[in-house]
Structure formats: structure tokens, C-alpha cells
Image (spheres, grey):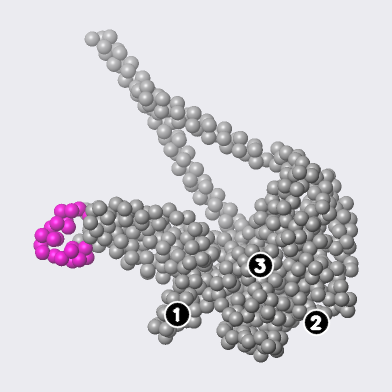
Amino acid sequence: MSTLDLSSETTRRLHGRRVHLGDLLLQGIAGLAALAALVVIGLIVWKVIDGARESLSRFGLGFVTTVAWDPVHNLFGAGSFLYGTALTSLIALLLAGPLAMGIALFLTELAPRWIQAPVTALVETLAAIPSVVVGLWGILVLAPTLRDHVEPFLHRTFGFIPLFGNPQTGHDIFTAVIVLTIMILPIVSSISRELFLGVPSELKEAALGLGTTRWEMVRGVMFPYARGGIAAALILGLGRAVGEAIAVTQVIGGFVGTPVNLFSAGDTLASKIASEYQGAATNLETSALIHLALILLVFSLLVNVFAQVIVRSVARRQGLTGVRR
Amino acid sequence: MPKSGLFRTTIALAVAAALAAIVAASAGASPAKKQDTTLTGAGSSLIAPALAVWKPLYGAARGVTVNYSSVGSGAGIKAITARTVDFGASDAPMTADQAAACNGCVQVPWALTATVPVYNIPGVGDTKLKLDGPTLAKIFLGQIKTWDDSAIKKLNPGLSLPSTSITVAHRADGSGDTYVFTDYLSKVSSVWKNEVGSATSVSWPTGVGGTGNSGVAAIVSSTPGSIGYISDAYVIQNHIAKARLKNASGRYTLPSIKSIGEAASLVKTVPADMNVSITNPPKTKNKKQWDAWPLSTFTYIIMPATTARAHDLKNFVTWALTHGQPPIAKYVFAPMPLVMIKAANKALTTVHS
């Protein structure tokens, strides 16, 4: 008895100490990992602010609204690129949102089972295409096609709206919008699909049992249930669109200004940085480009915070059924 | 229990390995460990084809490997300023700011090439379009909007020009080609000089930007009514129509080894900083020089005046200026004129270890 006690006591002690040691180790490693992420973010922010200092002190807050980029006369501003970024990403979101909902609904509710898996895989593959490849396809295929067929049609039909002016080269804001739409579509649709799959089947069956049509069920049960998640998915898509550089650089045509016509060249924050950084001739231009990066960083941060706020508030409103995704 | 022990050991090993890797990597990144049989450079994309030709030739001749990354002139100047490479390469000579930042750098011209206006006008074949400087400037200022404008018609009697509107294509990234092109326009148009100016990247009054020579070539070849400018080497690859340009001697010329060489031959004196612009070369009555191409340019190698690699760098540049010139002619690099080679050699003597 006593020996047994002793041995069990020893084991417990040993065991206890070992767990304690393991816990410490785990805590240390995990803590370090978390710290590393924080340090990296901190370093990036510090470095970006440091790099932008020259431009910040020279142009101040006016930088944000100034529509100019003139390396010869040392006059720089973010206005034109903020405009381009907002315009392209918002329209892309407007196009990708409904499309993604359609795909997600089709894959969860409407498609025959044998279609679901391959189509899901294909949509996810779309997300795996490197953006430089999408951009290349944009240059070689999309831009000429849009210029020769889609843009003239839109101009003829909706020409009274200033957005649809005279088509030029196909290297324009509109092509960038389509490229962005294609790039954010898989993100939004795959998250929405997961959300729709998460809607409890009892709820759906109950609605259908009450005699609703499939569309009424989707509108009355699935959308409200997944609302917060969908909003977050859309904002994630927006974040992707805002930050995309290479593919946009390849098709947007690089023009400084605030054209209302979607069929004229423009530029975005990310694509301006991508196209000019390597060739920046003066320290001030480099600093101004990093200033653009700072604005992009702040913007992305706001988008993320905004997404989290939406998700939380919707989750709270939904109370117990709250969606945590 | 043994499982978790194993797990822990694995983690500990992994952490140790990761730390070791980081230490090793940071040690490897230090420039002190560089081997003496390699020269590293970065910069201009215009000179990149020449360096690709030179690498195997120079390796075979002298046993030194020249590694070059074509990252753009501006980035090349940044790299040599930070001394992360042995040499930088730029199409535009360093600005006063850049030269000061580079802290005792020597720039030496080592190749001679050209940029050319290219166009896509339905019904107008290769080299049929004639332009002069002021007209070209007005097109790129957005003042001439259609191809049947009277200013263009006047230069092209007998050519049937469509009423197609003009789409201007330019570089969206900073580039030596842009420097050459805007340097020329600034010389032939006071409006251009005052409103836009010349640099590797400018604020374009009109038009659409493409990334790299290939980007501009793609826009021009796919857009009827467009005009742009690209390195002559790229025209050959892309089968795009080149425009004839009227030079100061009143001759409509095209870029070629000969006409680029003629432009360079008009250089009489070379300043100490080697900053020689040969765009819009002066008028001459000498028939051997009167076809000078107005958009010609030298491109430069930039080295620290004091460097441990002085010996290898000098050997390489001397070789490039002599043996290196003939093999790059196929990419439309014209031979360097004697006066420039002399000046380059003189500048090289200031590089020491």
C-alpha cells in the first residue's frame, strides 16, 4: 500500500513536473511566435513611416488629396491613386459579390451532387492562379476583347452615363476592374459556400416544410443566417482588391488623374508602387512611394477592423444562433 | 509519454536548426565572403542584352563571371549607392542628388544605343510615317489628336492618313528610354521643356502606360491609331512599324548602327562627369554624319571610386569597351566613338582600391 502510494506520489510529482516543463516550453515557443508576428508588424509600420518621413514633412496631409505625380518638378500626391483604388475595388466588389453568391448558392443548394465537387475545385483553382498570370492574360486576351467588343457596346448603349465614355486601348480602369473581379471571386464565393453549408439543415427544412419556395428559403433563412459572414467575406475581397498590385499594373495603363470614364487609363496605390519603385530617381520620389504604401497600410488596417466590427455586431444581433465564422 | 518526449526533442531540434540556419544565412549574406572570380551588377534593362552576350564571352576570356540583374536604372543606382553590388548600370547619367548620395562614384559610358518612335496606323506600313521633333512633342502633349492633322499631313505628302484618333503609349515604369525620349522632346519643344521636362519618369499630359518595353510594344501593336517609343532592340523582336524622324540636318532618318554612330560621332568634348547627351545632335553639312539618329544615347556603368574590386572592374570595362563592342551589334548597340573610349579610359584611372 505504502509502496504503491509512494510510487503513485512519485509518478504524480514527476508527471506534474514534466507537464509543467512542457507547458513552459509550449508557452515560450507559442509566445515567441506571437511576439514575432507583432515584432514584424511593428517593424514594417515603423520602417514605412520612417521611409515616408521626407514626403510626410514636405507634403503633409495635403498629399492625400493632391492629384499629381511629377518627378521632374518634385510634386507628388496620392489623390489620383486613392481615387483609382476606390473606384476599381468598389466596382469589382459590386460585380463579384452577386456572382459569388450565385456560385455559392448553386454549389450548396442547386447543383446536382456530381457537379458540386468538380466545380468547387475549379472555383478554388481560380484563386490559385498567380496574379501575374492573370495580368498577362489581361494584356493578351482580356484587354483587346473588352476594347473591341464589350466597351463599344457599353458605350453605344449606356454612353449617356459618363462612366461609359469613348473606348481607347483596353488598358484601362474597366479592364482592371474585370481582372480584380476575377481575382476576388473565388475568395468571396468559397467563404460564402462554407457559410451556406453551415446553415443548420433543420432551419432550411423547417422553412421548406412551411411551404416556402427554394428562393424564399434562401432569402428568409440562409442569407440572414450567413449575413455577418458574407459581409466579412465581401470585405476580405475588398482588401484583396485594394492590395492587388501586379495584375492591375499590367492592365490599368498608368495615368495620373481622376478620369470618370472607365475606359480611360488610371492607376491605383498598389500598382503605382509596383511600377515606379524600382525606377524612382530621387529620394523624394522613393519617399512619396513609401508614403503611398503607408496610406495603403492604414487603409487595409481600417478594412480589417471594419470587417471584424461587422462580424461582431451581426453575431451579437443574432444572439444564440450567432455565426462565428 | 515517450511520444511527447520525442515530440519535444523534435521541436527543440527544429528550433535549434532554424536558429542555426538564420545565423548561417546572415553570415552568408555578408559581402565579405564574396568570391574574387565574380562581379555582381544591377540596373538598366536596356544594357541587359549586352551583358547577357558578354557574360559567357568574358567568362571564357578572363575567367571572371559577371552576374547582372536587370532591375531598372533607378534601382541599379540605389544598389551601387548601398554598395550591395560591385557595379550599377544606368541609361540616364546620375542626377546631382544621386551622385552626391553615391558618395564618390564614377560613371563611365560603355555602350551606345537608341530609342525609336513606333506606331500602328491602319494602312501605313513600316518606316512610311515621317515626323519631326515639334510634331512629335505636340502629339505627346495631346495637342495633335488625330492622324490626319494638318501638321502630320504636311510632313507626309502622298501618304493617305486616316482620321483615326491618336492614342499615345508611354512607359508606366521609370526607364532610360523615357529619359532619352523626354530629353529629346525637351530640346525640340520649349512647351515640353517647361510643362513636362525630362527624367526617367515624367508626368505625362496624355496617353496610356505600359510596363517595360514589352508593355509599350503590346499596347502599340494591339491598338490601331497608337504611337509609342521603345528600345530599338525590341522593335526587331516585335515587328512594329518604326517612324522616320527629321534630325537637325533636315534628314529623315531611322535608327541603325550607322545612324546611331553618326549621332555619337558629333560629340567633340566630354565633361569630367561623363554626362553627354547626344539626343537631337547638331546640324552638320558632313554627309558622313548627316543621317544622325536624334534619339541616340550612351548608357553608363557606375562604380565606386574606391573599391576592393577596382582591378577586376577596370579589366571588365576596358574589355567591354573594346572586345565587347562587336558582339553586341546585333542588338543595335553601335560601336563607341574613340573620343568617348578615351574619356572612359581616363575616368577608369580614378577607380582604385
As helix, strand or loop, the secondary structure at mark 3 comes to helix
Image point (89%, 68%), residue name? B268
Type of residue at label 1?
Pro
Q: x and y percent of residue B5 in the render? A: 40, 24
Image point (85%, 47%), residue name? B352
For residue B40, side relative to residue B308 (left or right)? left
Which stretch did the figure color magenta? A199-220
- 10 Å neighbourhood of mark 2: few (<14), some, or many (≥20)? few
Q: Say which quarter of the image contains residue B284.
A: bottom right
Which residue corresponds to mark 2? B250
Q: Is residue A216 magenta?
A: yes
As helix, strand or loop, the secondary structure at mark 1 comes to helix
User: From the viewer's perspective, is residue A161 above or below residue B39?
Assistant: below
Callout 3: chain: B
Q: CA distance from mark 2 to mark 3?
A: 24 Å
- 10 Å neighbourhood of mark 1: few (<14), some, or many (≥20)? some
Type of residue at label 2?
Gly
Numbered label tally? 3
Q: Are marks 1 and 3 on the same chain?
A: no
Callout 1: chain: A
Q: Is residue B159 magenta?
A: no
As helix, strand or loop, the secondary structure at mark 2 comes to loop
Q: CA distance from mark 2 to mark 1?
A: 42 Å
Q: x and y percent of residue B173 in the render? A: 62, 65
For residue B351, side relative to residue A288 (left or right)? right
Asked if disc 2 and disc 1 are in contact, CB closer than 8 Å, the reply is no
Which residue corresponds to mark 3? B235
Dot label at residue A152: 1
N-term-proximal mark, 2 vs 3: 3
